Amino acid sequence: MLVLGIETSCDETAAAVVAGDKRVLADEVLSQQAEHRPFGGIVPEVAARSHLDHLDRLIVRALERAGASWDALAAVAATGGPGLIGGVMVGVTTAKAIASVCRIPFVAVNHLEGHALSARLVADVEFPYLLLLVSGGHCQLLIVEGVGRYARLGTTVDDAAGEACDKAAKLLGLGYPGGPAIERAARSGDTRRFNLPRPMLGKPGCDFSFSGLKTALARAVANIAPPGPQDVADMAAAFQDRVAAALAERTRNAIAAYRNRWPKGETLVIAGGVAANAEIRARIGRLASEHGMRLVAPPPRLCTDNAAMIAWAGIERLKLGLTDPLDFAPRPRWPLDPHA
Ligand code: KG4
Ligand code: ZN
């Protein structure tokens, strides 16, 4: 069973071909970073136009790389939201056209479900598992009970972790995208030189907050303006350390909630763009082993936005007979947990 996946919800145009037995036959990702860099962040209109310019060619290339013809496709899956609506419309419209011409089912995938199920593409992971989903737009702890079945334990009350990294990088003059830049700068930094706070330390529950940390960083930058390269490295190191500490703290509380509900639960999954960060992966890995849990962290390429995870989520849904009509309307907002 071959499924074509399409991802256009943010600043990556992506197309992939994945087989039902988990072989990723093609995984094409075209980053728009260079187009957005002059603006210091993502411009939705620029993103939508760029998806439109590149998606067709990328899909053809993915099919070529996979050695697959149009006839070989069992279905086409596209991100149906949440995300920047112009981009989502480009991907969904393209997928619907392919579905109607090839007479195959169309699957509208929730982008967050794509991240959530990516662990099952790379490892044998059974439901229910605990998920730390950390990306540019989302920062959540969820119990993944099945395809389409999520119980949210916590979310951010202000910024997502990736968004916080992007803002911090801007403050430090490290440019866009911020997460990878912070990680690079932090390598030669000292985490202890700057006294940045640990967000939500000791508070019960699983919600996140990063705005206080961001404000503290802004103050530290202003105090020594203009910061030299070592100052920037030390501040990046402190910032990354406090974000990692906050993620680990909240995940510790979530493990208790997960075990409460599922006493035999043994798997922790980390996914989303921020999960590409080696320090954060290591910190969450230590937490998992402290609790006798297995950590499943997809490789960095599958953590940041890609279409293989969308094709795979499409396969998971298809196996359950969950397809979507061609009048599916793209959704700018689409929470995983219906009670959210
Ligand atoms: O999942 P993703 O590619 O897109 C969204 O769905 O949001 O996540 C992008 C976010 C950005 O905020 C980016 O700065 C962050 O993930 N990110 C990182 C790293 N790589 C990407 N944050 C920290 N360290 C990284 N290495
Ligand atoms: Zn994402």
Image: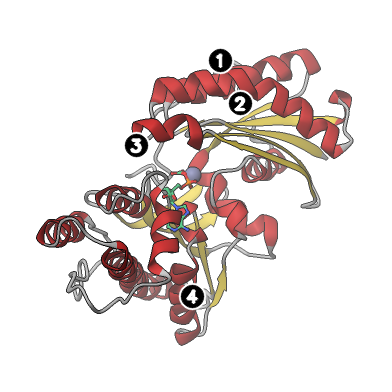
Q: Secondary structure at mark 1?
A: loop
Q: Amino acid at mark 2?
A: Asp
Q: Secondary structure at mark 4?
A: helix
**Between discs 3 and 2, the one toward the N terminus:** 3
Distance from Cα at disc 4 to Cα at disc 1: 44 Å
Mark 1 burial class by Cα count in 10 Å: few <14, some 14-19, many 20+: few
The quarter of the rendered structure image containing the N terminus is top right
Question: Which of pointers 2 and 4 indicates the residue nearer the eye?
Answer: 4
Q: Amino acid at mark 1?
A: Asp
Q: Nearer the viewer, residue 224 or 82?
A: 224
Write the residue at 87% across / 33% down. Answer: 68
Q: Which residue is mark 4?
A: 282
Distance from Cα at disc 3 to Cα at disc 2: 37 Å
The quarter of the rendered structure image containing the C terminus is top left
Question: Which of pointers 1 and 3 indicates the residue nearer the eye?
Answer: 3
Residue 4: x and y in percent read 73, 33
Q: Which residue is mark 3?
A: 40
Mark 3 burial class by Cα count in 10 Å: few <14, some 14-19, many 20+: some
Residue 235 occupies quadrant: bottom left
> Can see residue 330?
no
Residue 112: x and y in percent read 48, 44
Distance from Cα at disc 1 to Cα at disc 2: 8 Å
Q: Amino acid at mark 3?
A: Gly
Does residue 75 appear to the left or right of 31 in the view shown?
Answer: right
- Numbered tag placed on residue 327 in the rendering: 1
Distance from Cα at disc 4 to Cα at disc 3: 29 Å
Distance from Cα at disc 1 to Cα at disc 3: 36 Å
Q: Secondary structure at mark 2?
A: loop
Whether the residues at callouts 2 and 4 have beta carbons within 8 Å, the answer is: no
